[in-house]
Image: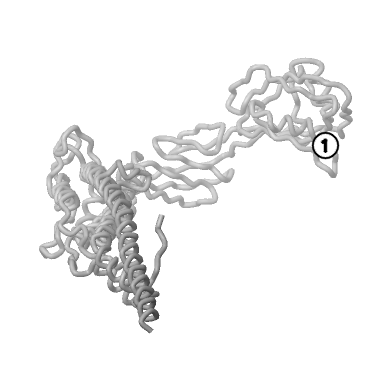
Amino acid sequence: MAGLRIGGLASGMDTDSIVFELMKAERLPLNKLTQNKQLLEWQRDDYREMNKLLQDFDKFIFDNMTLQSNLIKKKVTSSDTSAVTATANSSAANINTKISVTQTAKSATWISTKETTFMSGAQSTLNLMVTNGDGTTTDNIELVIEATDTVDDVLSKLSKKTELGISAFRDSETGKVVMTKKDTGENASIKLNDEVTASVFRSLGFEDALAENELNVGAEGSKGQNAKFSINGLSTSRTINTFTIDNVTYTLHKENSEATIALSNDTDNMVDKIVQFVNKYNEMLEKINGKLTEERYRSYQPLSTEEQESMTEKQVEQWEERAKSGLIKNDSILSSGLSKMRNDFYSPVSGTAVNSDYSQLTQIGIKTSSNYLEKGKLIIDEAKLREAVEKDPHAVFQLFNASGTTTEEKGIARRVRDTISGTIKNIEQKAGKATFTNQQYMIGRNLTNINTQIDRFEDRLTKIEDRYWRQFTAMEKAIQQSNSQMSYLMQSFA
């Protein structure tokens, strides 16, 4: 705790200013530590920014280049989309298929013949068995009706019982109950397994709708029906309107109609994805190389608070721009990562899954720029790329995604992702990530060490400043005492 400080009362000296100037000199090592801390934080942030670029590129590759369903697509057209539409996966053959629709699949609907007379008052348990449109049958399904349940409560419970697979409501105008099977098909039926259940359904208005305990659709209802159609002359049926044949999924929309479904390779999709892949790589490459070649201005050190206060906001911004420049210049981790990535692109892909005519990027129109200043930028001949994709899209896919145990056998996208993963891990060991503690990465440990040094030095400065004040206070007291003695002597001589 600082003692009594006497500032120039006897000597007339500006003690505050003198101590301030003395402490400025003492603080120089502390300022250097603070600058080093700031530089480390900026360097850490630069590394993390580079990792963000790598992670974004890796995500793009995963989302767009590694899944066959994303890269190889089929273009499907219908001569009459109001009749039939279709989609196809990448394995579908490029053929034309004629679909003639006789009838579409429909759901069964049960409509009560009379208004409901249901009255609450006693708890009961319904026992039902449902046959779905495709002919599959459920086990006995129990549904508890509480004594306090209203008609709407009962219908809500019927709709919410997923095993039943129906929706039920009461029409407010006619008072009749409508139940509709959620799936389609001609085999749909509902069986009432005991008299209690039959009694409840009679009270719901289905008085004339029971035959051998099976719920009748009623005069206004309708049985379910299967879809009936012919495909290239072959007559067949399905219980649903959307079905898959030979990797093509058809959807029937209109009865007594026909359409021709034509399949072809969606060349545009694959070409666009590969062009985007190359552009993303070039964009990432340019930004990282920009950081690796950034000029380092060693005379521009981080500004202290006092220095910032003496400058305009624009001057501070310009100063810090240079102070931050070049902090990861020629970094070996990033340089090594880019070098390995370039090798991933250049090296041919081997292995049994790869067509020898499609084992290198140059064979599909992608090569490295001849301008050495562009440091490995990729150039695309889109006409050649399109020709390769049209000729054999699966071979192009394997060039990027072939699997293998060695780097040589892996497709280019897989290689690049492996390189990105290794580079990110190396950067995290040096610069960490947001969830790391300082002890988990090298720069963080250095920051912890500097913080410790700063704390110790600030304690030391406090003691030095106290010493200066004790010295000046002692001097002031001595002068004051001398002045008192002199005054006494002069009074005595007078």
Work out whether residue 438 or residue 175 is closer to the camera in this orientation and state it: 438
Q: Residue at x 49, y 33 (%)?
A: 235
Q: Position of residue 101 (x, y in %)?
A: 54, 41
| Nearer to the camera, 30 or 322 | 30
Please indicate whether residue 466 sits to the left or right of residue 379 in the image. right
SS state under label 1 = loop
What residue is drawn where x is 33% and y is 72%? 482
Left or right: 297 as drawn, with respect to 99 = left
Nearest the eye: 185 or 429: 429
Would you identify the image quadrant in which residue 103 lies? top right
Task: Tell me the residue at 70%/35% (across/down).
Answer: 167
Specify whether residue 437 is in view. yes
Image quarter hosting the C terminus: bottom left
- Judged from this view, the residue extending furthest toward the bottom is 494
Q: Is residue 308 visible?
A: no
Which residue sits furthest front? Answer: 493
x and y percent of residue 300 in the render? 22, 69
Identified by mark 1, the residue type is: Lys
Q: Position of residue 451 (x, y in %)?
A: 31, 51
Query: Residue at the location (57% across, 39% down)?
Result: 102
Residue 277, by quadrant, is: bottom left
Label 1, on which residue? 176
Q: In the rendered image, which quarter contains the N terminus? A: bottom left
Q: Residue furthest top?
A: 194
Front residue of 191 and 219: 191
Indicate how the structure is coloured in the image.
one colour
Crowding around mark 1 (Cα neighbors within 10 Å: few <14, some 14 to 19, many 20+) is some
Q: Is residue 332 left or right of residue 48?
A: left
Q: Residue 186 in the image: state x and y as whole percent.
A: 63, 29
